[in-house]
Amino acid sequence: MNSIKGMATNDAAIVVGAWDFTKINKGYQEYLSLADKAPPLKRKADSAEAAWVHWLRQERAGWLDAVSADPLLPEGLLPKSYLGQQAAAARQAVLARAGELFGR
């Protein structure tokens, strides 16, 4: 049992030492802030569509910036403070809202 416990501790030390999760989380925090700024839904309003198209371009760039620093490790290896899953859930929710506006 101790060897398994030791392996988990060793894995955590390797993960923390190999990747800068402070920087990774900063990218996801910036993405979460961007996701919170999604335009309101206003059906059949040209200004709403234009605002969403502009925002979706920013969203895509923000997501790619955030995820590009992430090693995308299995869940069992992620630090407890990891924000990637929260950011991914926020992205799914906000893109679902965009899909409502654009009829998808």
Image: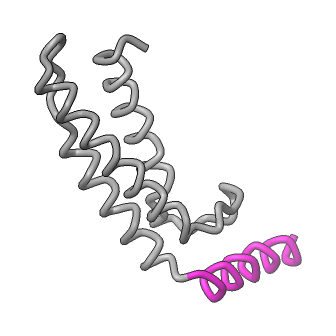
Residue at x 65% of width, y 61% of height: 72
The residue segment tinted magenta is 1-19
Looking at the picture, tell me which residue is in the foreground, 82 or 7.
82
On screen, residue 87 versus residue 101, left or right, reads right
Most common secondary structure along the magenta stretch: helix
On screen, residue 76 versus residue 87, left or right, reads right
The colour style of the image is one colour
Q: Position of residue 48 (x, y in %)?
A: 15, 26
Q: Position of residue 84 (x, y in %)?
A: 49, 56
Compared with 77, 92 (above or below) is: above
- Is 98 inside the magenta-drawn segment? no
Residue at x 45% of width, y 64% of height: 65
Looking at the picture, tell me which residue is in the foreground, 49 or 78.
49
> Which image quadrant: the N terminus?
bottom right
Compared with 99, 22 (above or below) is: below
On screen, residue 57 versus residue 9, left or right, reads left
> Which image quadrant: the C terminus?
top left
Compared with 77, 100 (above or below) is: above
Task: Classify residue 54 by image quadrant.
Answer: top left
Most extreme residue toward the bottom, as rendered? 17
Q: Position of residue 85 (x, y in %)?
A: 50, 50
Residue at x 44% of width, y 34% of height: 92
Looking at the picture, tell me which residue is in the foreground, 54 or 89.
54
Looking at the picture, tell me which residue is in the foreground, 54 or 3.
54
Residue at x 71% of width, y 79% of height: 9
Q: Position of residue 40 (x, y in %)?
A: 14, 28
- Is 4 inside the magenta-drawn segment? yes
Count of labels shown? 0
